[in-house]
Image (cartoon, grey):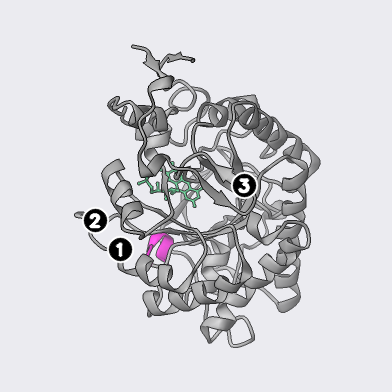
Amino acid sequence: MSIDLRAAPKAPLFSPIAIGELTLSSRIVMAPMTRQRASQGKIPNDLNARYYAQRAGAGLIISESTEVDPFSTVDVPTRPGLCNAEQEAGWRLVTTAVHAAGGKIFVQLSHMGRTAHPSQLLDGRQPVGPSPLAATGTIYTVKGQEPYSIPRALEIDEIETVTAEFAAAAIRAKSAGFDGIEIHGANGYLVDQFLRDGSNIRRDRYGGTVENRTRFLLEIITAIKAYWPANRIGVRLSPTNSYQGMSDSNPVGHFARIAGLLDPLGLAYLHVVEPPVQPRGQPVTALKLRTAFSGPLILAGGYKRADAESALATGQADLIAFGEAFIANPDLPDRWRYGVPLALADKSTFYTQGAKGYTDYPSLPRVEG
Ligand SMILES: Cc1cc2nc3c(=O)[nH]c(=O)nc-3n(C[C@H](O)[C@H](O)[C@H](O)COP(=O)(O)O)c2cc1C
Protein backbone atom coordinates (compact mmCIF):
# COMPACT_ATOMS: atom_id res chain seq x y z
CA MET A 1 0.00 0.00 0.00
CA SER A 2 1.30 3.49 -0.77
CA ILE A 3 0.06 6.91 0.38
CA ASP A 4 0.05 10.29 -1.36
CA LEU A 5 1.44 12.93 1.00
CA ARG A 6 0.04 15.76 -1.20
CA ALA A 7 -3.51 14.97 -0.04
CA ALA A 8 -2.99 15.58 3.69
CA PRO A 9 -6.22 16.46 5.55
CA LYS A 10 -6.20 19.11 8.33
CA ALA A 11 -6.97 18.22 11.96
CA PRO A 12 -6.16 19.93 15.28
CA LEU A 13 -3.69 17.18 16.10
CA PHE A 14 -1.83 18.18 12.95
CA SER A 15 -1.71 21.92 13.56
CA PRO A 16 1.77 23.32 14.20
CA ILE A 17 2.66 24.82 17.58
CA ALA A 18 5.43 27.21 18.62
CA ILE A 19 7.46 26.33 21.71
CA GLY A 20 9.66 29.40 22.17
CA GLU A 21 11.35 29.86 18.81
CA LEU A 22 10.91 26.15 17.94
CA THR A 23 7.98 25.35 15.67
CA LEU A 24 6.70 21.80 16.01
CA SER A 25 4.96 20.43 12.93
CA SER A 26 2.13 18.84 14.95
CA ARG A 27 0.78 18.31 18.48
CA ILE A 28 1.87 14.65 18.36
CA VAL A 29 4.70 13.94 20.80
CA MET A 30 6.57 10.66 21.08
CA ALA A 31 6.60 9.89 24.82
CA PRO A 32 9.89 9.03 26.53
CA MET A 33 10.39 5.26 26.48
CA THR A 34 13.23 3.23 27.94
CA ARG A 35 14.13 0.48 25.48
CA GLN A 36 17.39 -0.80 27.07
CA ARG A 37 19.30 -1.08 23.79
CA ALA A 38 22.28 1.21 24.33
CA SER A 39 25.75 -0.33 24.01
CA GLN A 40 27.95 -1.38 26.93
CA GLY A 41 28.97 1.70 28.90
CA LYS A 42 25.46 3.14 28.49
CA ILE A 43 26.48 4.50 25.07
CA PRO A 44 23.81 5.15 22.39
CA ASN A 45 24.58 3.50 19.06
CA ASP A 46 23.60 3.33 15.36
CA LEU A 47 20.62 1.06 16.09
CA ASN A 48 19.25 3.65 18.54
CA ALA A 49 19.79 6.37 15.90
CA ARG A 50 17.84 4.33 13.37
CA TYR A 51 14.97 3.75 15.84
CA TYR A 52 14.58 7.44 16.64
CA ALA A 53 15.00 8.57 13.00
CA GLN A 54 12.19 6.18 11.99
CA ARG A 55 9.93 8.14 14.38
CA ALA A 56 11.01 11.66 13.29
CA GLY A 57 7.51 12.35 11.91
CA ALA A 58 6.42 13.17 15.49
CA GLY A 59 6.06 16.90 16.20
CA LEU A 60 8.55 16.27 19.02
CA ILE A 61 10.43 13.17 20.21
CA ILE A 62 11.30 12.94 23.89
CA SER A 63 14.15 10.49 24.36
CA GLU A 64 14.14 7.57 26.74
CA SER A 65 15.16 8.27 30.33
CA THR A 66 18.87 9.15 30.27
CA GLU A 67 21.06 8.86 33.34
CA VAL A 68 22.89 11.92 34.72
CA ASP A 69 24.53 9.98 37.57
CA PRO A 70 28.17 9.21 36.68
CA PHE A 71 28.15 6.44 39.31
CA SER A 72 25.45 4.59 37.39
CA THR A 73 27.82 2.45 35.37
CA VAL A 74 26.55 -1.10 35.15
CA ASP A 75 23.25 -2.04 33.64
CA VAL A 76 21.99 -5.21 32.01
CA PRO A 77 20.32 -4.68 29.61
CA THR A 78 21.50 -1.18 28.96
CA ARG A 79 19.89 2.19 29.49
CA PRO A 80 21.82 5.20 28.13
CA GLY A 81 23.65 7.90 30.06
CA LEU A 82 24.87 11.41 29.27
CA CYS A 83 27.79 11.74 31.65
CA ASN A 84 30.91 11.34 29.49
CA ALA A 85 32.30 12.03 26.01
CA GLU A 86 31.48 8.55 24.67
CA GLN A 87 27.83 8.80 25.69
CA GLU A 88 27.67 12.33 24.25
CA ALA A 89 29.10 11.10 20.93
CA GLY A 90 26.56 8.26 20.91
CA TRP A 91 23.72 10.70 21.38
CA ARG A 92 25.12 12.87 18.56
CA LEU A 93 24.48 9.91 16.22
CA VAL A 94 20.85 9.97 17.33
CA THR A 95 20.23 13.72 17.07
CA THR A 96 21.97 13.89 13.68
CA ALA A 97 19.77 11.08 12.32
CA VAL A 98 16.57 12.63 13.73
CA HIS A 99 17.39 16.08 12.33
CA ALA A 100 18.30 14.60 8.94
CA ALA A 101 14.85 13.00 8.92
CA GLY A 102 13.22 16.38 9.71
CA GLY A 103 12.46 15.72 13.39
CA LYS A 104 13.09 17.44 16.73
CA ILE A 105 14.26 15.71 19.89
CA PHE A 106 14.55 16.61 23.58
CA VAL A 107 16.54 14.40 25.97
CA GLN A 108 14.86 13.19 29.15
CA LEU A 109 17.40 13.63 31.97
CA SER A 110 16.93 11.39 34.96
CA HIS A 111 18.49 10.14 38.19
CA MET A 112 17.37 6.77 39.56
CA GLY A 113 17.70 7.70 43.24
CA ARG A 114 16.23 4.95 45.42
CA THR A 115 15.25 2.82 42.40
CA ALA A 116 18.88 2.01 41.56
CA HIS A 117 20.49 -1.23 42.76
CA PRO A 118 23.99 -1.41 44.30
CA SER A 119 25.01 -3.80 41.51
CA GLN A 120 24.23 -1.02 38.99
CA LEU A 121 26.36 1.58 40.78
CA LEU A 122 30.12 2.09 40.82
CA ASP A 123 31.78 0.19 43.72
CA GLY A 124 28.41 -1.35 44.63
CA ARG A 125 27.55 1.86 46.47
CA GLN A 126 24.23 2.35 48.26
CA PRO A 127 21.43 4.03 46.29
CA VAL A 128 20.42 7.50 47.51
CA GLY A 129 17.11 9.27 47.96
CA PRO A 130 15.54 12.16 49.84
CA SER A 131 14.81 9.88 52.83
CA PRO A 132 15.65 6.31 53.97
CA LEU A 133 12.44 4.85 52.53
CA ALA A 134 12.72 1.97 50.06
CA ALA A 135 10.73 1.69 46.84
CA THR A 136 8.30 -1.21 46.84
CA GLY A 137 8.64 -4.16 44.48
CA THR A 138 11.71 -5.67 42.86
CA ILE A 139 14.34 -4.59 40.38
CA TYR A 140 15.87 -6.61 37.55
CA THR A 141 19.61 -7.14 38.22
CA VAL A 142 22.35 -9.39 36.85
CA LYS A 143 21.20 -11.96 39.43
CA GLY A 144 17.52 -11.69 38.42
CA GLN A 145 14.76 -9.90 40.34
CA GLU A 146 15.86 -8.46 43.70
CA PRO A 147 14.04 -6.25 46.24
CA TYR A 148 14.87 -2.53 46.33
CA SER A 149 17.23 -1.56 49.14
CA ILE A 150 16.74 1.23 51.67
CA PRO A 151 18.42 4.35 50.20
CA ARG A 152 20.78 6.62 52.06
CA ALA A 153 19.31 10.12 52.54
CA LEU A 154 21.31 12.65 50.54
CA GLU A 155 23.24 15.24 52.57
CA ILE A 156 22.68 18.88 51.57
CA ASP A 157 26.05 19.15 49.81
CA GLU A 158 25.30 15.92 47.93
CA ILE A 159 22.01 17.40 46.68
CA GLU A 160 24.06 20.27 45.26
CA THR A 161 26.34 17.71 43.58
CA VAL A 162 23.40 15.91 41.96
CA THR A 163 22.05 19.27 40.76
CA ALA A 164 25.44 19.93 39.17
CA GLU A 165 25.27 16.48 37.51
CA PHE A 166 21.97 17.46 35.86
CA ALA A 167 23.63 20.68 34.65
CA ALA A 168 26.68 18.79 33.35
CA ALA A 169 24.44 16.41 31.39
CA ALA A 170 22.51 19.42 30.05
CA ILE A 171 25.76 20.93 28.75
CA ARG A 172 26.57 17.63 27.03
CA ALA A 173 23.03 17.54 25.63
CA LYS A 174 23.73 20.83 23.89
CA SER A 175 27.00 19.57 22.38
CA ALA A 176 25.24 16.35 21.38
CA GLY A 177 22.74 18.38 19.30
CA PHE A 178 19.51 18.00 21.27
CA ASP A 179 16.79 20.61 20.74
CA GLY A 180 16.01 20.77 24.45
CA ILE A 181 15.86 19.06 27.83
CA GLU A 182 13.05 17.30 29.67
CA ILE A 183 13.70 16.92 33.40
CA HIS A 184 12.27 13.57 34.50
CA GLY A 185 10.22 14.51 37.53
CA ALA A 186 7.82 11.57 37.11
CA ASN A 187 7.36 7.84 37.70
CA GLY A 188 9.18 7.43 41.01
CA TYR A 189 12.71 8.55 40.09
CA LEU A 190 14.81 10.92 42.19
CA VAL A 191 13.10 14.25 41.39
CA ASP A 192 9.66 12.65 41.92
CA GLN A 193 10.95 11.09 45.16
CA PHE A 194 11.67 14.62 46.41
CA LEU A 195 8.33 16.03 45.20
CA ARG A 196 5.99 13.55 46.91
CA ASP A 197 5.47 13.33 50.66
CA GLY A 198 5.22 9.52 50.59
CA SER A 199 8.95 9.32 49.75
CA ASN A 200 10.24 12.62 51.20
CA ILE A 201 10.08 12.99 55.00
CA ARG A 202 13.05 15.35 55.29
CA ARG A 203 12.99 18.08 57.93
CA ASP A 204 15.46 20.44 56.25
CA ARG A 205 14.85 22.95 53.43
CA TYR A 206 14.21 20.09 50.97
CA GLY A 207 11.25 18.60 52.87
CA GLY A 208 8.11 19.44 54.84
CA THR A 209 6.25 21.98 52.68
CA VAL A 210 5.45 21.68 48.96
CA GLU A 211 7.80 24.61 48.37
CA ASN A 212 10.63 22.76 50.12
CA ARG A 213 9.97 19.48 48.28
CA THR A 214 10.02 21.39 44.97
CA ARG A 215 13.31 23.14 45.82
CA PHE A 216 15.45 20.36 44.30
CA LEU A 217 13.58 20.54 40.96
CA LEU A 218 13.71 24.35 40.93
CA GLU A 219 17.45 24.30 41.65
CA ILE A 220 18.01 21.84 38.79
CA ILE A 221 16.09 24.16 36.45
CA THR A 222 18.13 27.17 37.63
CA ALA A 223 21.37 25.25 37.08
CA ILE A 224 20.35 24.17 33.56
CA LYS A 225 19.18 27.71 32.72
CA ALA A 226 22.82 28.81 32.85
CA TYR A 227 23.28 26.84 29.60
CA TRP A 228 19.83 26.58 27.98
CA PRO A 229 17.03 29.14 27.62
CA ALA A 230 14.05 28.33 29.83
CA ASN A 231 11.89 27.76 26.74
CA ARG A 232 14.05 24.75 25.85
CA ILE A 233 13.51 23.11 29.25
CA GLY A 234 10.43 20.95 29.92
CA VAL A 235 9.39 19.10 33.08
CA ARG A 236 7.54 15.78 33.32
CA LEU A 237 5.37 15.08 36.40
CA SER A 238 3.17 12.13 37.41
CA PRO A 239 1.05 13.32 40.36
CA THR A 240 -1.02 10.16 40.78
CA ASN A 241 1.22 7.36 39.49
CA SER A 242 1.81 4.76 42.24
CA TYR A 243 4.59 3.02 40.29
CA GLN A 244 7.47 1.78 42.49
CA GLY A 245 5.59 2.51 45.71
CA MET A 246 5.10 6.23 45.11
CA SER A 247 2.36 8.12 46.97
CA ASP A 248 1.32 11.58 48.05
CA SER A 249 -1.21 12.64 50.68
CA ASN A 250 -2.80 15.28 48.39
CA PRO A 251 -1.70 14.82 44.78
CA VAL A 252 -4.13 17.30 43.24
CA GLY A 253 -3.49 20.12 45.72
CA HIS A 254 0.25 19.58 46.01
CA PHE A 255 0.89 19.25 42.29
CA ALA A 256 -1.28 22.26 41.44
CA ARG A 257 1.03 24.21 43.77
CA ILE A 258 4.11 22.69 42.10
CA ALA A 259 2.71 23.71 38.68
CA GLY A 260 2.18 27.19 40.10
CA LEU A 261 5.82 27.35 41.20
CA LEU A 262 6.92 26.33 37.69
CA ASP A 263 4.56 28.77 35.96
CA PRO A 264 6.63 31.98 36.12
CA LEU A 265 9.77 30.31 34.76
CA GLY A 266 8.84 30.46 31.05
CA LEU A 267 9.48 26.75 30.48
CA ALA A 268 9.07 25.01 27.12
CA TYR A 269 6.26 22.91 28.55
CA LEU A 270 4.82 20.99 31.47
CA HIS A 271 4.29 17.29 30.68
CA VAL A 272 1.80 15.44 32.87
CA VAL A 273 1.38 11.66 32.74
CA GLU A 274 -1.53 10.05 34.51
CA PRO A 275 -2.74 6.46 34.56
CA PRO A 276 -5.37 6.09 31.83
CA VAL A 277 -8.98 6.17 33.03
CA GLN A 278 -11.69 4.94 30.65
CA PRO A 279 -13.98 6.50 29.65
CA ARG A 280 -11.45 9.30 29.69
CA GLY A 281 -13.75 12.21 30.61
CA GLN A 282 -12.04 14.97 32.56
CA PRO A 283 -8.52 14.28 33.86
CA VAL A 284 -9.00 15.94 37.26
CA THR A 285 -5.36 16.42 38.23
CA ALA A 286 -4.33 17.57 34.79
CA LEU A 287 -7.14 20.15 34.71
CA LYS A 288 -5.97 21.62 38.03
CA LEU A 289 -2.44 21.79 36.69
CA ARG A 290 -3.74 23.40 33.48
CA THR A 291 -5.22 26.21 35.55
CA ALA A 292 -2.02 26.69 37.53
CA PHE A 293 0.41 26.54 34.58
CA SER A 294 -0.07 28.99 31.70
CA GLY A 295 2.58 27.58 29.32
CA PRO A 296 2.24 24.67 26.87
CA LEU A 297 0.84 21.51 28.49
CA ILE A 298 1.49 17.97 27.23
CA LEU A 299 -0.79 15.20 28.51
CA ALA A 300 0.07 11.49 28.32
CA GLY A 301 -1.26 8.16 29.49
CA GLY A 302 -3.29 5.81 27.33
CA TYR A 303 -4.45 8.41 24.79
CA LYS A 304 -6.10 7.18 21.60
CA ARG A 305 -6.47 9.49 18.63
CA ALA A 306 -10.08 10.45 19.47
CA ASP A 307 -9.19 11.22 23.14
CA ALA A 308 -6.30 13.32 21.93
CA GLU A 309 -8.42 15.29 19.45
CA SER A 310 -11.00 15.91 22.16
CA ALA A 311 -8.39 17.00 24.76
CA LEU A 312 -6.97 19.49 22.25
CA ALA A 313 -10.38 20.72 21.05
CA THR A 314 -11.59 21.38 24.62
CA GLY A 315 -8.34 23.10 25.60
CA GLN A 316 -7.35 20.48 28.21
CA ALA A 317 -3.92 20.23 26.58
CA ASP A 318 -1.75 21.76 23.85
CA LEU A 319 0.03 18.55 22.88
CA ILE A 320 -0.48 14.84 23.51
CA ALA A 321 2.31 12.31 24.03
CA PHE A 322 1.88 8.74 22.79
CA GLY A 323 4.00 5.84 23.99
CA GLU A 324 3.19 2.30 22.94
CA ALA A 325 1.56 3.43 19.69
CA PHE A 326 4.92 4.87 18.59
CA ILE A 327 6.72 1.61 19.36
CA ALA A 328 4.66 -0.38 16.84
CA ASN A 329 3.96 2.47 14.39
CA PRO A 330 7.12 4.40 13.56
CA ASP A 331 5.04 6.52 11.14
CA LEU A 332 2.16 7.03 13.60
CA PRO A 333 1.25 10.57 12.39
CA ASP A 334 1.04 9.39 8.75
CA ARG A 335 -1.15 6.44 9.71
CA TRP A 336 -3.59 8.77 11.45
CA ARG A 337 -3.48 11.31 8.61
CA TYR A 338 -4.45 8.70 6.08
CA GLY A 339 -6.70 6.52 8.22
CA VAL A 340 -4.44 3.48 8.11
CA PRO A 341 -5.04 0.98 10.98
CA LEU A 342 -2.41 0.88 13.71
CA ALA A 343 -0.16 -2.09 14.44
CA LEU A 344 -0.07 -3.43 18.01
CA ALA A 345 3.15 -3.35 20.03
CA ASP A 346 4.69 -6.64 21.18
CA LYS A 347 5.26 -6.13 24.92
CA SER A 348 7.64 -9.09 25.10
CA THR A 349 10.27 -7.11 23.15
CA PHE A 350 9.99 -3.78 24.97
CA TYR A 351 13.21 -4.35 26.92
CA THR A 352 15.04 -7.02 24.92
CA GLN A 353 18.15 -6.63 22.80
CA GLY A 354 18.66 -5.93 19.11
CA ALA A 355 16.46 -4.88 16.21
CA LYS A 356 13.58 -7.28 16.86
CA GLY A 357 10.60 -5.36 18.24
CA TYR A 358 12.65 -2.17 17.97
CA THR A 359 13.52 -1.09 14.44
CA ASP A 360 11.70 -3.84 12.52
CA TYR A 361 8.15 -2.42 12.74
CA PRO A 362 7.41 -1.34 9.16
CA SER A 363 6.45 2.15 8.00
CA LEU A 364 4.08 2.67 5.10
CA PRO A 365 5.75 3.26 1.75
CA ARG A 366 5.62 6.95 0.83
CA VAL A 367 4.77 8.67 -2.45
CA GLU A 368 6.59 12.00 -2.28
CA GLY A 369 5.08 15.03 -4.04
C1 LIG B 1 8.48 0.48 27.09
C2 LIG B 1 8.14 1.72 27.88
C3 LIG B 1 9.19 2.46 28.44
C4 LIG B 1 8.91 3.64 29.13
N1 LIG B 1 9.96 4.40 29.61
C5 LIG B 1 9.73 5.64 30.12
C6 LIG B 1 10.80 6.52 30.40
O1 LIG B 1 11.98 6.22 30.17
N2 LIG B 1 10.50 7.73 30.93
C7 LIG B 1 9.20 8.11 31.19
O2 LIG B 1 8.98 9.23 31.68
N3 LIG B 1 8.16 7.30 30.89
C8 LIG B 1 8.39 6.10 30.33
N4 LIG B 1 7.34 5.31 29.94
C9 LIG B 1 5.96 5.83 30.04
C10 LIG B 1 5.55 6.49 28.71
O3 LIG B 1 6.28 7.69 28.49
C11 LIG B 1 4.05 6.85 28.66
O4 LIG B 1 3.78 7.82 29.61
C12 LIG B 1 3.18 5.62 28.91
O5 LIG B 1 3.55 4.57 28.04
C13 LIG B 1 1.70 5.93 28.71
O6 LIG B 1 1.45 6.36 27.39
P1 LIG B 1 0.81 5.35 26.31
O7 LIG B 1 -0.42 4.79 26.95
O8 LIG B 1 0.53 6.22 25.11
O9 LIG B 1 1.83 4.29 26.03
C14 LIG B 1 7.58 4.10 29.28
C15 LIG B 1 6.54 3.34 28.73
C16 LIG B 1 6.81 2.18 28.02
C17 LIG B 1 5.69 1.41 27.39
Residue 242, magenta (yes or no) = yes
As measured in the structure, the alpha-carbon distance from the residue carrying label 2 to the one carrying label 1 is 7 Å
Report whether 305 appears left or right of 28: left
Q: Which of marks 3 and 1 is nearer the N terminus?
A: 3
In front: 50, or 105? 105
Ligand 1 closer than 8 Å to the CB at disc 2?
Answer: no
Local SS, label 2: loop
Mark 3–mark 2 Cα distance, whole angstroms, equals 30 Å
Q: Mark 3 points at which residue?
A: 22
Q: What number is the disc on residue 280?
A: 2
Give x and y (percent) for residue 293: 49, 69
Residue 159: within the magenta? Answer: no
Residue 24 visible, this orientation: yes
| Magenta-tinted stretch | 240-246
Query: Counting other residues with Cα less than 10 Å from the Cα at mark 1, is it few (<14), some (14-19), or many (20 or more)?
Result: some
Disc 1: which residue: 283
Amino acid type indicated by mark 3? Leu
- First reached walking from the N terminus: tag 3 or tag 2: 3
Q: Measuring from the top left, give residue 95's x and y in whole percent.
A: 66, 35
Say if mark 2 contacts mark 1, CB within 8 Å: yes
* Label 2 packing within 10 angstroms: few (<14), some (14-19), many (20+): few
Q: Which of marks 3 and 2 is in front?
A: 3
